[in-house]
Image: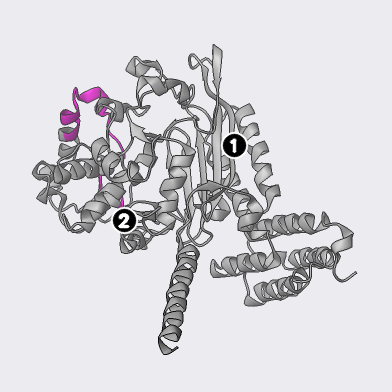
Amino acid sequence: MKNRLMSVMLAYVLFASVFFAGISTTATAAPIVQPGTPGSVQMLQEPLDEIDDVIQQGIADQYMAGSVFLAARSGTIVKEDAYGYAARYLDDDFTEMENPVEMQTDTIFDLASITKVFTATAAMQLYEQGKFNLDDPVADYIPEFAQNGKSDVTIRQLLTHTSGFPAWIPLYQTTDSREEAYQEVFATPLDHEPGTHYGYSDLNMITIGALVEQISGKRLDEYIKENITEPLGMTDTMFNPPESLKDRMAATEYQPQTDREIVWGEVHDENAWAMDGVAGHAGLFSTAQDLAVFAQMILNNGEYQGTRILKTETVDIMERNELPEFPGSAHSLAWELNQDWYMGDLSGRKTMGHTGFTGTSIVINPSKETVAILLTNKVHPTREAPSTNPIRQEVAGKTAAAINAWSASTMKALVEDFADEEAFSSDAAAHSLKVHLSAVSHYEGQDAADKIVKHMEGFKNLLEHQRENMSQDAYKTLKTDADYLINKWGSVPHHINALE
């Protein structure tokens, strides 16, 4: 009897351990990128729907020929849509193609400078392996780099654009090979003393690409494929895409200066083109979904579907502002940080992002676990098109509104964020708004739609009363989000109003 009881107890313990281990694994599994509904990740549909009109108007006003937009939260793709044309024009006079190619959600875009974050990720993998220290002089690994006063420039300074390099030089006009281009970059003198000036420069990341090649023994495209894109399953991300994929690609600029006419199927950036399509600053092609996977890897602290690309501590480093001494130019070792000129209301101290000259952008907000990717062919057929920054900013703002306006509690968190950013002239103004939203949260817990609407209208009156005590951005955002929340509850059928 005793042995039988022991057997039963052991069996129970074994079952319980397996059962609860399964629960623990499920509960802590890192998100993967997959489609879902906005409501499943506490986002509203209405602001996301409004993105369509923003992009369509941009196409009508010739900001770009077409676009793909993707928004995801906690790995759930809540919006993924294509607009306009991937290829439409034959020249910079806007001569229409006989058979223009419509944009698709899996259209492959020339990422331009978004390439830089992949190059930086490659470098940080080598840093993890102890191949270099961030404050090592670049010349320790590339001796030719020491020319013209650059012997003390560090790897960190290249990654943070504080090396003192000029922004750009026309390699495509002055060199005849990839090796010649490297040698010209290594010989280029500085415009500023290292560490004294933030100046965004392609030459920084061209040199980081060379560093990756020097240390790894592989060309940059091979290294990134083997160590980043292939392990992540990013099958549509590559340098120098094959001709067979041309019909899936977004065309870019009409370039008589390079004798290429409409650039379609090869890199747009002239210097990357002169470097055989493979450079640290530009040359990578990708889709919105592939970029969402890369972004989710960052949000998952360097891991995706069991594959670790970066250590957690490395991701932490890459989220940290390295340039507090240059206000407004927050930058990590890979990413631009908190740049509201294109991140809109998704911006925050740890919000990471990058843009590309061809009209591409990616924004990652870790605190909201949210990604917004806008890919456009802004330079098709000419780079003289208006800046897409207002569109980037607006679609990011509507993505943020879909989160912030989900409930009174998320709006309260938004007020707290604005308070942290010193958007209120007094603590009392923020406090009164938070108290009111706390009261609305009580009614939300009871699904009391009529009372929620009534009290949110009261919140708008309070907002108007406090308008002089807050920034215009805070006022406008809170007012818009209040309207979204009122619309949400105003559409609830009366029969479920709990307090009627």
Disc 1 versus disc 2: distance between alpha carbons? 30 Å
Q: Secondary structure at mark 1?
A: strand
In the image, farthest residue toward the right: 500
Badge 1 vs badge 2, beta-carbon distance below 8 Å: no
What's drawn in magenta, residue-wise? Answer: 160-182
- Whether 415 is drawn above or below 123: the answer is below
Disc on res. 81: 1
**Disc 2 packing (10 Å; few <14; some 14–19; many ≥20):** many
Please, what is the three-letter code of the amino acid marked with disc 1? Asp
Query: Who's the residue at 60% across and 57% down the image?
Result: 41
Residue appearing at x 63%, y 49% in the figure? 37
Residue toward you, 450 or 354 = 450
Q: Is residue 145 visible?
A: yes
Left or right of residue 484, residue 218 in this image: left
User: Residue 75: where, in percent of width, then height?
Assistant: 51, 52
Q: Position of residue 19 (x, y in %)?
A: 48, 70
Q: x%, y% of residue 115?
A: 35, 40
Residue 44 screen position, x and y as percent = 68, 53
